[in-house]
Amino acid sequence: MSQFFSIKTPVKFEGAGTANPLAFRHYDAKKTIGGKSLAEHLRFTVCYWHSFTWTGSDPFGGPTIERPWIGAGDQMALAKQKADVAFDMFTVLGAPYFSFHDRDIAPEGATLAESNKNVSVIAEIFAKKMQATGVKLLWGTANMFSHRRFMAGAATNPDPDVFAWCAAQVKHAMDVTHQLGGENYVMWGGREGYESLLNTDLKRELAQAGRFLQMAVDYKHKIGFKGPILIEPKPQEPTKHQYDYDVGNVYGFLKANGVEKDVKVNIEQNHAMLAKHSFEHEIELALALGIFGSLDINRGDNQVGWDTDQFAMNVPEMVLAFYPIVKAGGFTTGGLNFDAKIRRQSLDADDLLHGHIGSMDACARAWEIATTMAADGTLEKHVAARYAGWDKPENKQMLDGKTTLADIAARVAKNEPNPQPRSCKQEYLENLINRYM
Ligand code: XUL
Ligand code: CO
């Protein structure tokens, strides 16, 4: 165990009354709900990028957070040191999963071959650490947005050489994810969009992105990768417009390219917010369309118009997000990935622990409340009652695919239905929800 954190033994569940800031107050990993432990329900995942590579830079200032493995020196030796601390943190937190981009875990080399080799060397170290600790990989991904070669896009770049580069990079990232038993493979299109339509052939770029995804799906099948590919919608930032704007846009894109069975979505709270949706809207829609995959759990700030990626701590907000997932039976291959970072003034090593512990507690609390809401069924009953008219055979018939507009018009002419408006009961239901909180 490295000397990085102030504690070297796993954080314990001590209950709501504890004053220990490095203990769980609500997340009791072993507690079972419906035959499954909280650990199995929540599938907590620590991300490599914000936790181990982010140094606090923002558009107005450079690094504030110092890490022993970031800076000059033998970059592969530093990457190994970073891996040691990362697995220490996973173990201390009792997080069952982690996630990474290829460039988070190993330095970019002089050539793509060298970069790929660096990733493979660290992946071999991961394999041993995963075996020793039992920590698993929720997903891997390729960073195709930081380097300047991607400034005009990755798969949607006007330059076919960049497209080819990305194909080779994704192939390797998928290979490594597969070797490590990754349960999903994620794609976030940070540069897949445009800055100006004046220089952009939008139709062509969408076709490039579609073909790229089809090839990734084919490759997944070829290597026997069982998990889904997950697209992570985000409307803008860093580009003015990103093609994977939101769940609705992504679904249209998947259908247009015939990959809706193999590709699902990884939904992030702060991205939903930037698209002017609620987190729960994006989740409900993905579930309704059959493409719900996983969550990047974090929170944005209403006063700050960009992706602040803060640790999610607001229990009532999360209850609303988790409720549809609980109703649908919980996660399958997905989980709760902490795509969240400490603030740039949070300089201490233990701040990483406080962020994760607090958010794991908030998630556990929210999941339990959502479970109670779903089991109680009162809300569900109100929704069912609102649509109860559709249970009548003559009304079901209107949607049976055979009935025509003219048939319905004839029925209405014979026996005019005379619709009676009914209260939606929104305030009543909002009060009901508060009773569970
Ligand atoms: C960026 C973002 C990414 C993805 C993975 O906003 O969320 O970190 O989660 O590429
Ligand atoms: Co994310």
Image (cartoon, rainbow, N blue to C red):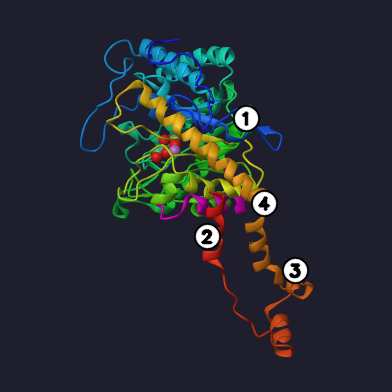
- As drawn, the label of residue 430 is 2
Question: Could you tell me if the residues under marks 3 and 1 are in contact, i.e. CB atoms within 8 Å?
Answer: no
- Which residue is at 35% across, 21% downward? 349
Q: How many numbered marks have been drawn onto this rendered protein structure? A: 4
Which secondary structure, mark 2?
A: helix
Q: Amino acid at mark 2?
A: Glu
Residue on which the image places disc 3: 391
In the figure, 146 relative to 181: above or below? below
The answer to which of 104 and 262 lies nearer the viewer is 104
Q: Earlier in the sequence, mark 3 or mark 1?
A: 1
Q: Which residue is mark 1?
A: 225
- Label 1 neighbourhood size at 10 Å, few (<14), some (14-19), many (20+)? many
Residue 296: image location, x then y, percent: 48, 39
What residue is pinned by disc 4?
A: 376
- Can you tell which of label 2 and label 3 is closer to the viewer? 2
The furthest residue to the right: 393
From the viewer's perspective, tell me whether residue 108 is left or right of residue 356: left
